[in-house]
Amino acid sequence: MEKEFSRVRSAQDIIISLILVAAGAVLVALPTSGSVNILGFFLILAGLVLILVLKTAYRLDGTKETYRKSEKFFPQSKKDSFTNALKTSPDTVDLTEENKGNGLRLDIFYSHKTGKAYCRLYEYIPYRYEPCTPYFEYGVDKVAKLLK
């Protein structure tokens, strides 16, 4: 079965949205000037839009675990060395070439709560990134160097 990650709302996203809606409702309910009421309505609207749009966590399909995502970009010339490093030990990846090209993208999905991390390398084919490796599962401590 191929692993796929989908974007979901994290608890932090929901809390931020609810705080904005509650703060706006308080400002509207207070007997204050019209400008404060307008600010309250703006905060309510912003909170409602965020609750519909904001999704910062990722969930592995078929599980309830949520992950954070880190992306790093590298030049195309590093494809073979990165593929070999991801197969054996991700802490040997050479990060000196980071952001010196965008031919490769390294996605790292990690969760400190569960201690799991998944790494995958993507290659840029015009107009999109195509996966060139499967997902590799490691412990978060093993990929800590890549998360810096």
Image: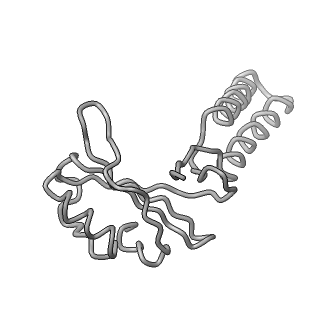
Is residue 9 depicted above or below 94 in this figure? above
- Where residue 87 sits: x, y (%)? 33, 69
Question: Is 11 positioned to the left or the right of 129 in the image?
Answer: right
The answer to which of 142 and 144 lies nearer the viewer is 142
Q: Which of the 4 image quadrants contains residue 91?
A: bottom left
Question: Is 60 positioned to the left or the right of 69 in the image?
Answer: right
The answer to which of 33 and 118 lies nearer the viewer is 118
The answer to which of 136 and 37 lies nearer the viewer is 136
Is residue 75 depicted above or below 92 in this figure? above
- Where residue 59 sits: x, y (%)? 60, 51
Q: What colour scheme governs how the chains and residues are painted in the rendered image of this protein? A: one colour
Question: Is 95 positioned to the left or the right of 22 in the image?
Answer: left
Identify the residue shown where x is 18% and y is 49%.
Answer: 101
Identify the residue shown where x is 59% and y is 53%.
Answer: 60
The answer to which of 28 and 52 lies nearer the viewer is 52
Identify the residue shown where x is 33% and y is 42%.
Answer: 130
Looking at this rendering, what residue extends furthest in the front direction?
A: 1
Is residue 65 depicted above or below 15 in this figure? below
- Where residue 62 sits: x, y (%)? 66, 52
- Where residue 122 sits: x, y (%)? 32, 49
The number of discs equals: 0
Q: Which of the 4 image quadrants contains residue 133?
A: bottom left
Q: Which of the 4 image quadrants contains residue 6?
A: top right
Looking at this rendering, what residue extends furthest in the left direction?
A: 77
